[in-house]
Image: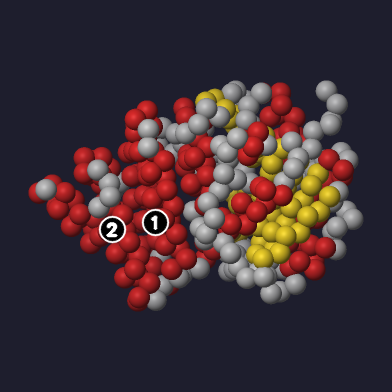
């Protein structure tokens, strides 16, 4: 089959001058002909010359589109902007502090076409800025190289599944998912935007496969990453879970996934509470109040069941926020 497929690579970035050169350099050996790749960079209010560095690659990466937000809008908004600008057959994502092994995108387009699925997922490599050895992080799905209904990869509740692996850069998407709205992002979310998007996609009739591929390397513990900030932007996960909850509860046939949403919420809330010493006192109070308020919107029976299943460590972290809600619901 001739290599006539093409791909748009969407890169949202805010103050990524230290890393974006490596990311863009890794794109130089992705496809057989540079004309088959469009690179869409969303410079989200950078003040460190990120856009200038990106422009240096303009004649080396096929078509390059640089969109500039004069002030930071959010990762969610940047992904929306990127999808609007992307016009190739396939859509890939790359964070500005990550990079791809040569030939990855050509391989993914070929495999997606061969398997006849809407999107692919892959494993990835984690590279730690703290100096510890790199490690492989496997996509949590045992079935490989076979088409799967995305809905069938949401459960079980008590084990990791593809719905727990929301990284958009760990795979590739056919643009029909964008055209018909199955792959869509939410503006204004400073974090958690990827998890909402993967839930929205997985609740549709989309098909997916997990395949082996040349690596993508995810850089961990970068100081400027949103995963490393300790302010109220991290509370975006509450807004994100509200969107996911509403998606799952909107149709009777999707309510079977309610327990999975609650399990994810409790796990991620516990993660944020465990690291809240980096937050200000005011933001810690906001975090706990937001967790408790969201818990009041959940059905008592599945909340109580998942509360018992999450383990003592997480119950200890979340007890002050969740136990009062469970008591109120039990007595209602």
Res 151 visible: yes
Q: Quadrant of residue 44?
A: bottom right
* x, y percent for residue 127: 63, 55
Specify whether 287 is left or right of 20. left
What label sits on residue 18 in the rendered view?
Answer: none
Q: Tag 1's secondary structure?
A: helix
Crowd rating for badge 1 (residues with CA inside 10 Å; few <14, some 14–19, many 20+): many
Q: Residue at x 41, y 55 (%)?
A: 239
Specify whether 27 is left or right of 121. right
Q: Residue at x 43, y 68 (%)?
A: 232
Q: Considering depth in this image, is 275 or 195 the residue closer to the camera?
A: 195
* x, y percent for residue 204: 50, 31
* x, y percent for residue 43: 69, 63
Q: Residue at x 45, y 63 (%)?
A: 234
In the rendered image, the quadrant that contains the N terminus is top right
Specify whether 56 is left or right of 322. right
* x, y percent for residue 273: 36, 62
Real-space CA distance between mark 1 and mark 2, rounded to the nearest whole angstrom? 9 Å
What label sits on residue 238 in the rendered view?
Answer: 1
Q: Classify 255 as above or below 26.
A: above
First reached walking from the N terminus: tag 1 or tag 2: 1
Crowd rating for badge 2 (residues with CA inside 10 Å; few <14, some 14–19, many 20+): some
Q: Which residue is situated farthest in the bottom direction here?
A: 281
Q: Tag 2's secondary structure?
A: helix
Q: Which residue carries the number 2 mark?
A: 293
Q: Residue at x 66, y 57 (%)?
A: 12
| Residues tagged 1 and 2 counted as in contact (Cβ below 8 A) | yes
């Amino acid at each position: 089959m001739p290599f006539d497929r093409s791909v748009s690579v969407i890169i949202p970035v805010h103050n990524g001058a230290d890393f974006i050169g490596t990311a863009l350099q890794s794109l130089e050996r992705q496809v057989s002909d540079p004309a088959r790749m469009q690179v869409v960079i969303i410079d989200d209010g950078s003040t460190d010359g990120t856009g200038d560095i990106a422009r240096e690659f303009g004649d080396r990466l096929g078509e390059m589109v640089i969109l500039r937000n004069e002030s930071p809008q959010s990762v969610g908004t940047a992904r929306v902007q990127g999808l609007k600008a992307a016009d190739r057959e396939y859509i890939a994502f790359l964070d500005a502090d990550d990079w791809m092994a040569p030939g990855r995108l050509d391989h993914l387009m070929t495999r997606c076409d061969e398997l006849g699925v809407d999107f692919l997922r892959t494993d990835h490599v984690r590279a730690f800025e703290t100096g510890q050895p790199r490690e492989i992080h496997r996509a949590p799905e045992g079935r490989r190289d076979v088409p799967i209904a995305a809905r069938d990869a949401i459960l079980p509740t008590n084990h990791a599944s593809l719905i727990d692996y929301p990284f958009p850069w760990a795979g590739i998407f056919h643009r029909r998912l964008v055209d018909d709205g199955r792959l869509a992002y939410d503006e204004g979310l400073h974090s958690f935007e990827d998890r909402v998007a993967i839930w929205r996609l997985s609740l549709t009739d989309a098909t997916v496969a997990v395949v082996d591929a040349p690596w993508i390397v995810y850089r961990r513990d970068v100081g400027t990453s949103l995963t490393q900030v300790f302010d109220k932007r991290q509370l975006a996960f509450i807004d994100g879970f509200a969107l996911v909850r509403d998606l799952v509860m909107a149709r009777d046939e999707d309510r079977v996934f309610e327990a999975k949403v609650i399990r994810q919420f409790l796990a991620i809330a516990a993660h944020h509470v465990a690291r809240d010493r980096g937050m200000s006192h005011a933001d810690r109070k906001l975090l706990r109040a937001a967790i408790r308020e969201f818990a009041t919107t959940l059905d008592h029976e599945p909340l109580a069941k998942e509360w018992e299943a999450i383990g003592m460590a997480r119950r200890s972290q979340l007890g002050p926020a969740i136990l009062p809600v469970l008591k109120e619901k039990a007595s209602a």
